[in-house]
Amino acid sequence: MTAKKPHTLSGSVSHSDNGTEGNTAANGAVRAHLLIVNQRPDELRPLIELLRSDRYRVSVAFDGAQGYHRAQAHAPDLILLDVRLPGLDGFSVCRLLKAHPRTKEIPVIFLTDASSIEERLHGLRNGGVDYILKPFEPVEVLARICIHLSLAARRSSEEAVLSPSARSEDQVLVQAVARYLTDSLAATPNLAALARRFGTHEKRLSRAFREQLGKTVFEYLRESRLLLSKRLLAETSLKIVDIAAQVGFSSAANFATAFREQFSLTPRAFRHSVHGSALPPVE
């Protein structure tokens, strides 16, 4: 597609006529396409600049209806959606997105300046995967974007494996449980509670995972946590103790032991191997 002539958004944040804040070829390959829906995107300029510097493709919409139509047209990899929007509010937009086959799987992260727990729960019940309160630190938003893109990619690859035209009941069960686990790594129930949640029992759930994925539920969960932690170590500056908590380990020590067993390196050593002397290990 031929790039259109850029113009200026409120005098500061530049983007193209189709709402895309693209990156030049000199910046390397674009990592993912993000749609930001906010009626005052100038206030998000530090975040947008950080995302651009990290080679994300960023599109901007100014109200709920425009955001919905841009999502349908471009199917971004993730949407940052303000709750307070003219016309359709963020909750209404999210419900519409989740009701449409083209956009129902796109992760939606809500942005808001309201700290009401009721509002946050309302957003999550309407299909949001996360809630970020304003004012926020751009690096924290970037870290959360990385987390949810990683979870979405893992879900997509697993669903591709488990998507023959005629899936067995066990395949459907494993796919549903795997998706639930990757969405709740930091707070997962025990095996008995997990089985009850999906209307089955522990033995059947364990057998289904072994037959479909070749691993136990615990092994799948542990692998998911470690793979996500590896990406966070490589792509963010989050402290190791915060990464451990983010992916569901009870302590940084337990996380370090599991990481070393899986990858033959400590988290600190792995981060240093990725960044070398350019970025000292962060604890």
Image (cartoon, rainbow, N blue to C red):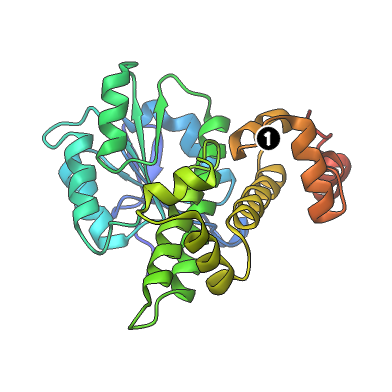
Residue 137 lies left or right of residue 165; in this view the side is right
Question: What secondary structure is marked by label 1?
Answer: helix
Q: Is 270 rendered above or below residue 63?
A: below
Q: Point out the residue furthest to the left here.
A: 87
**Residue 136: x %, y % from top left:** 48, 23
- The image quarter containing residue 40 is top left
* Nearer to me, 175 or 36: 175
Q: Which residue lies furthest to the bottom in this view?
A: 165
- Find residue 61 and report its horizontal and vertical position in percent: 27, 43
The residue depicted at 32 percent of the width and 19 percent of the height is: 117
What amino acid is at disc 1? Ala
Number of marks in picture: 1
Residue 38: in sight, yes or no? no
Residue 85 place in picture, x, y as percent: 20, 31
Number of other residues with Cα within 10 Å of mark 1, as a class: few under 14, some 14 to 19, many 20 or more: many
Q: Name the residue under label 1.
A: 244
Observer able to see residue 202: yes
Compared with 263, 137 (above or below) is: above
Which quarter of the rendered picture does the C terminus lie within?
A: top right
Q: Quadrant of residue 113?
A: top left
Residue closest to the eye, 32 or 21: 32
Residue at position x 80%, y 39% in the image: 256
| Image height of 100 relative to 14, above or below | below
Closest to the observer: 240 or 158? 158
Q: In this view, does 75 lie to the left or right of 242?
A: left
Q: Where is residue 39 in the image (x, y as percent from the top left)?
A: 25, 32
Quarter of the N terminus within the rendering: bottom left
Q: Residue at x 44, y 68 (%)?
A: 159
